[in-house]
Amino acid sequence: MVDLKLIREEPQRIAEALQARGVGVSLDEILTLDAERRQLLREAEELRAFRNRVSEEIAEAKRQGQAAEREVARMREVGDRLKSLDPEIRAREERIDALLLQLPNLPHESVPRGASAADNREIRRWGEPRRFDFAPKAHWEIGEALGILDFARGAKLAGSRFTVLWGVGAQLERALITFMLDLHIREHGYRELWTPALVNSASLRGTGQLPKFADDLFQTQDDLWLIPTAEVPITNLHRDEILPGDQLPLRYCAYTPCFRREAGSHGADVRGLIRQHQFDKVELVKFTKPQTSYDELELLTTDAEAVLQRLELPYQVVALCTGDLGFAAAKTFDLEVWMPGQGKYREISSCSNFEAFQARRAQIRFRPAAGGKAEFVHTLNGSGVAVGRTMAAILENCQQGDGSVTIPKALRPYLDGLERIEPPR
RNA sequence: GGAGGGGUGGCCGAGCGGCCGAAGGCGCCGGUCUUGAAAACCGGAAGGCGAAAGCCUCGGGGGUUCGAAUCCCUCCCCCUCCGCCA
């Protein structure tokens, strides 16, 4: 949520920042409602102060056994006036809130300006895409030939964009999850969590998925929603809390399944593991002080990169431009892994600093160690990394001419030393 | 799912409709004492909005009342017993 005070004080600057994201919004309605609300609020508060004072006098009179009929009658009028004022104020508050919840975050000044993904800026590359002496296949062909990916039965059980993993495929999924968790827990200083995969709407509002993106989510008949990412339960852990400043930064890591409706992406990535309704992900989340959040974003990104480096998968890091930025993010680095079957880099992790946007929605604050006023924390998160897409990248990057796939060395301890997945004879 | 009991400050816990933003205890901070610490004693501090006056906050929302932590309705959460269950 964008700070209402900021909109009130610098509407021009905010409007321009939103313009850079390609969001053509007018702040006029918010500003008008805000002025009205503050005017009404003042009147109501003065009436309340008056009532509190006179009620005190009534109490005193009663104590002394005196009547106070005139005061009581007057206060009844004041009460009536307040009763008509309150809905007026509330109506404006609700409307302001609804409008604020629709506004995306303001981009950080370092974010490259641009209209679409074409304007994203490459930051660095790691690893050399392998040269093949045969035409590299797409991972779905490789996986089906190996008998480890079963899209047909996934469709039979649940529909398109669902997959069944068989044998070594299922083991590989499990190995990747454990490998990623171990790396972040043991070497990068994250604390492991296990969370609900169903959350309430307040949690989704806190991180920014609701109210605007309900269509992207699976909802149950019990007012609970399937999480689209572990970002939601982890960030909301500290919703409505004030954290001790000396505990920051907090670094959390969790594996969860993720569920996305993928409404509106019917044509894209219809085959393979890239775009599934259900997928596994290891997620990193940080709560930091405002002063250190951009340093922590750099660290978060390199923590995610470490996964790909250990697995020897070539990738590039890209800074998203203003037009490609997600709704809640102030700045985002995407990690894109090389996919030989498609001959391009594909997103496998997205590392973002949300600054106080989520903290303000979810009321997550910290109290500075020296004491004093509570401030909003900055929240960050990043995939560390998407498991299904990692499996796809391994299949494509490590495929051999004979149809087999070699297992990256870092993963072998998690697969009883298995070095290679062989096609069935 | 059925029956019952609860949600009050960092924690525990008291609270006749008005002097209750809230006793007391624990914990915390400062001080006295001590070589230092502990103990003891003294003192201090709830949160939010606001420049301030002031307003709001006793699980959430609504109602009754001149006035609600206290009465009523409703929702949420927790606990106990029964049923069901991995």
Image (spheres, coloured by chain):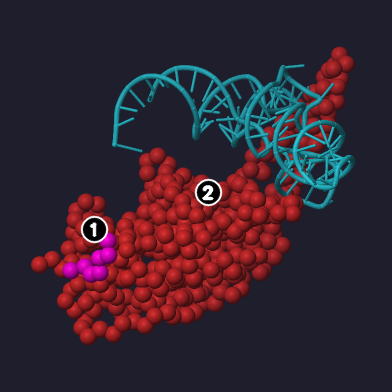
Direction top: furthest residue? A65
Q: Report the magenta stretch's main SS.
A: loop
Q: State the quadrant of the C terminus of chain A.
A: bottom left
Q: Colour of chain B?
A: cyan
Q: Quadrant of residue A113?
A: bottom right
Total residue callouts: 2
Rendering coords of residue A377 (x, y %):
62, 57
Gap between marks 1 and 2 measured at Cα: 32 Å
Q: Observer-nearest residue: B56 or A420?
A: A420
Q: Observer-nearest residue: A143 or B19?
A: A143
In the image, residue A421 lies in the stretch drawn in magenta:
yes
Q: Amino acid at mark 2?
A: Leu
Q: Give the numbered dot on residue A237.
A: 2
Rendering coords of residue A221 (x, y %):
37, 41
Rendering coords of residue A394 (x, y %):
30, 70
The chain identifier of the residue carrying mark 1 reads: A
Indicate the secondary structure of the residue bearing disc 1. strand
| First of labels 1, 2 by sequence position | 1
A315 left or right of A211? left
B33 left or right of A39? right
Indicate the secondary structure of the residue bearing disc 2. loop
Residue designated by label 1 = A165
**Residue at x 32% of width, y 63% of height:** A413
Q: Which residues are magenta?
A: A416-422
The chain identifier of the residue carrying mark 2 reads: A
Q: Give the numbered dot on residue A230.
A: none
**Residue at x 47% of width, y 80% of height:** A124
Q: Which chain gets the red colouring? A: A
Q: State the quadrant of the N terminus of chain A.
A: bottom right
Direction left: furthest residue? A425
Q: From this view, report whether residue A357 is shown above or below residue A311.
A: above
